[in-house]
Amino acid sequence: MTVAEKTEKKSGGIGEVVSVIVQALILALIIRTILFQPFSIPSGSMRPTLLEGDYLFVSKFAYGYSRYSLPFGPDLFEGRIWEGEPERGDVAVFKLPSNPRLDYIKRVIGLPGDTVQMRDGALFLNGEPVEREAIGTIDDVDITEQQRPVRVYRETLPNGVSYRTLDVTEGTVGDDTREFVVPEGHYFVLGDNRDNSADSRFNVGFVPAENLVGRANIIFFSIAGGASPLEVWRWPAELRLDRFFASAAR
């Protein structure tokens, strides 16, 4: 083999590696844009359903696609393509209406045309109280962020979707609200941690359909203590193995 042939073979090998890497990146981008997007929980607003350190997959095709389905949200088109409507009780990731650079995750409670109100800590939909049952307390700081037992309720929406909520403190500003009327093309969202959630009761407001990114499906990894998944030496003590492959909505 001549020097020229060796050089050509070496160049071809590097070119093949670059080609494989580029193809893999394109494939990952397509999967992330069209099918599933990984998402990590940034705050405690969805406790006890979702905890900081939970990593989950968000279904991008559940609600169709908008500009926010694409990385960086380029203004290429308006509305949604192959639009799918959220169901009451879905846990959805969306772009914050006031700052679309930020991702939020909350539970969809009010659909277009609904009225939503909190009265003495209880949820009312279209003037009717949502079924709410006290089921005890949780005394686990990893779940509640509180060094004491916290009351837990089970809410069941009219369509049968059931989930737990926390009542950390009685008589907070979010426990009694005005009646909200959800506009067409918008949704009303709440955090399951009712006393520690920025949601449609406050600065989030109504979420436009265009801002929906996808539906939270399944937790694929969970680690406590503020640890990074890359800190493998902390796995034995901090991994929450019981949360692996659990539903991200209940």
Image (spheres, helix red, strand yellow):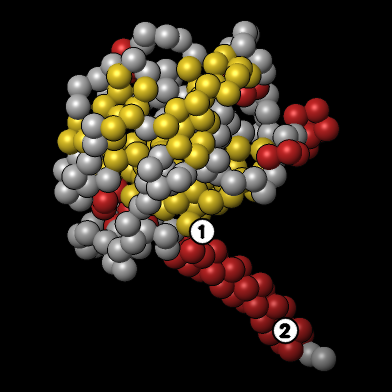
Instruction: Write down the residue under mark 1.
Output: 36
Look at the image and tell me whether residue 96 can be seen.
no
The crowding category of the residue bearing disc 2, from other C-alpha atoms within 10 Å (few below 14, some 14 to 19, many at least 20), is few
Q: Is residue 214 above or below residue 139?
A: below
Task: State left or right for residue 122 relative to residue 219.
Answer: left
Q: Residue 9 has which mark?
A: 2
Q: Residue farthest to the bottom?
A: 1
In the rendered image, residue 36, in percent from the top left (x then y), is placed at 51, 59
Whichever of callouts 2 and 1 sits on the residue coming sooner in the sequence is: 2
Residue type at mark 1?
Phe
Question: In the rendered image, which quarter is residue 34 located in?
Answer: bottom left
Foreground tag (2 vs 1): 1
In the rendered image, residue 4, in percent from the top left (x then y), is placed at 72, 87
Q: Nearer the viewer, residue 166 or 92?
A: 166
Q: Nearer the viewer, residue 93 or 135?
A: 135
Question: Residue visible at 55% across and 40% down?
Answer: 250
Question: In the rendered image, which quarter is residue 198 located in?
Answer: top left
Q: Nearer the viewer, residue 94 or 4?
A: 94
